[in-house]
Image: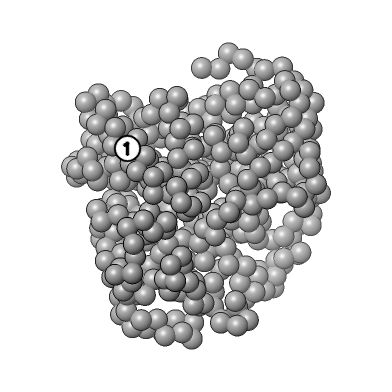
């Protein structure tokens, strides 16, 4: 695509819907830095008359009511971001790590005695949603139901719209319950915000925050496990090398980022971008993974001791956070949410490697299969073997 079209590529979405995929690092920085020219205002879209009510990507485009991820202006976004950020900042990182360790041990207890597991379904996918369910106020029993719903929603298949409706039902019920009986959780703190958001606004913000935090974190764990099991540079981490865990996690954000493409931005007026004429109302897809892999930025990193020039054979970008894994600009993933995702992912990896230090893939690495999604990049399965150990037990 770069060779034939440059940094901004004309693409088609299901139903022959045209869009622009931004794959240049500089161009993506330009789009995400200019919310006036490229707002996240779905009302600007010049293709609405062609979009059927059952269009599978409709949940990704957003809802009519504003929320932290779907607002018509940067000012609206900031209003929601302040409320969500305050609620997430109130999460104590020590309590969060304790929850992660408890739930990680519980999941590992369910398979550790048999000497084999499928680490996506048994561990990487359920762990983040179980932790997030606790944080926002769901009982543990609903965590796995949410994981199943969000998996189907993210893949954008024929069941995506039904999954979206089910997800909304879960969140609506949670907000109603917390309105009646508040607790020490994120949902209750959002409802108590002094700016007095409506229940529907809180529900939509909870929905977007949970969806944005679940699968990318699950895939961050899964992709990091895959890297550490298939790359000799990280072999020491399997014996408890915590430093290598952090290196692997950051390299994944550069080279194998869980969120590949974000939908999207809409051009407020006719403009030029990356040598292309972008019309008013055109949809732009943010190619986060492609921008990370832009030869210009890779060369710049290499010039500073980058690719292949790091220490111990680890590429220098493994210690560089200038990636687009969390997007950029006013609509990027809020810092408290990034911190929560990192604690969940890192704790999950550390507990897993501490308890099962001799993990090994049970199939050839070349046969591993990625999820069928252009938007999120993760493994469908990670079958492993290890020396059986006793369950730790005693976890709430």
Residue 188 shows up from this direction: no
In the visual, does 271 lie left or right of 129?
left
Q: Position of residue 250 (x, y in %)?
A: 62, 52
Residue drawn at (75%, 50%) of the image = 367
Is 151 rendered above or below residue 68? above
In the visual, does 177 lie left or right of 126?
left
Q: Nearer the viewer, residue 249 or 263?
A: 263
Q: State the image quarter where residue 112 is shown.
A: top right
Image coloring type: one colour
In the visual, does 379 lie left or right of 279?
right
Q: Position of residue 110 (x, y in %)?
A: 63, 22
Quarter of the picture holding the N terminus: bottom right
Residue drawn at (45%, 24%) of the image = 141
Residue drawn at (51%, 77%) of the image = 9
Q: Secondary structure at mark 1?
A: helix
Residue 65 shows up from this direction: yes
Is 73 rendered above or below residue 110? below
Q: Residues within 10 Å of mark 1 (few under 14, many from 20)?
A: few
Q: Position of residue 293 (x, y in %)?
A: 62, 67
Is 254 rendered above or below residue 33? above
Q: How many marks?
A: 1
Q: Position of residue 256 (x, y in %)?
A: 63, 56
Residue farthest to the top?
394
| Residue topped by disc 1 | 169
Residue drawn at (52%, 58%) of the image = 375
Q: Nearer the viewer, residue 213 or 318?
A: 213
Q: State the image quarter where residue 272 is shown.
A: bottom left
């Amino acid at each position: 695509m770069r060779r034939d079209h440059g940094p901004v590529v004309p693409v088609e979405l299901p139903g022959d819907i045209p869009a622009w995929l931004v794959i240049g690092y500089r161009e993506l920085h330009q789009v995400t830095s200019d919310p006036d020219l490229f707002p996240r205002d779905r009302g600007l879209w010049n293709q609405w008359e062609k979009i059927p009510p059952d269009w599978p990507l409709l949940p990704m485009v957003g809802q009519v009511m504003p929320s932290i991820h779907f607002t018509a202006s940067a000012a609206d976004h900031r209003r929601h971001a302040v409320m969500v950020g305050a609620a997430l900042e109130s999460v104590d990182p020590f309590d969060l790590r304790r929850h992660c360790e408890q739930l990680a041990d519980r999941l590992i207890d369910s398979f550790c005695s048999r000497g084999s597991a499928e680490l996506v379904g048994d561990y990487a996918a359920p762990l983040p949603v179980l932790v997030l369910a606790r944080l926002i106020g769901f009982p543990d029993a609903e965590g796995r139901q949410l994981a199943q719903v969000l998996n189907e929603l993210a893949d954008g298949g024929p069941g995506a719209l039904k999954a979206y409706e089910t997800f909304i039902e879960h969140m609506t019920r949670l907000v109603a319950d917390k309105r009646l009986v508040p607790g020490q959780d994120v949902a209750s703190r959002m409802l108590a915000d002094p700016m007095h958001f409506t229940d529907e606004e809180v529900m939509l913000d909870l929905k977007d925050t949970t969806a944005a935090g679940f699968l990318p974190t699950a895939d961050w764990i899964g992709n990091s496990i895959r890297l550490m099991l298939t790359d000799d540079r990280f072999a020491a981490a399997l014996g408890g090398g915590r430093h290598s865990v952090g290196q692997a996690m950051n390299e994944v954000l550069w080279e194998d980022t869980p969120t590949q493409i974000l939908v999207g931005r809409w051009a407020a007026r006719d403009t030029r971008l990356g040598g292309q004429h972008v019309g008013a109302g055109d949809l732009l897809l943010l190619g986060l993974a492609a921008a990370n892999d832009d030869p210009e930025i890779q060369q710049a990193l290499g010039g500073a001791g980058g690719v292949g020039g790091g220490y111990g054979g680890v590429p220098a970008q493994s210690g560089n956070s200038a990636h687009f894994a969390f997007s950029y600009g006013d609509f990027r993933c809020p810092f408290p949410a990034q911190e929560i995702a990192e604690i969940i992912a890192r704790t999950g990896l550390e507990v897993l490697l501490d308890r099962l230090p001799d993990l090994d893939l049970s199939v050839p690495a070349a046969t591993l299969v990625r999820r069928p999604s252009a938007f999120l990049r993760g493994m469908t399965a990670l079958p492993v073997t290890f020396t059986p150990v006793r369950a730790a037990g005693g976890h709430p």
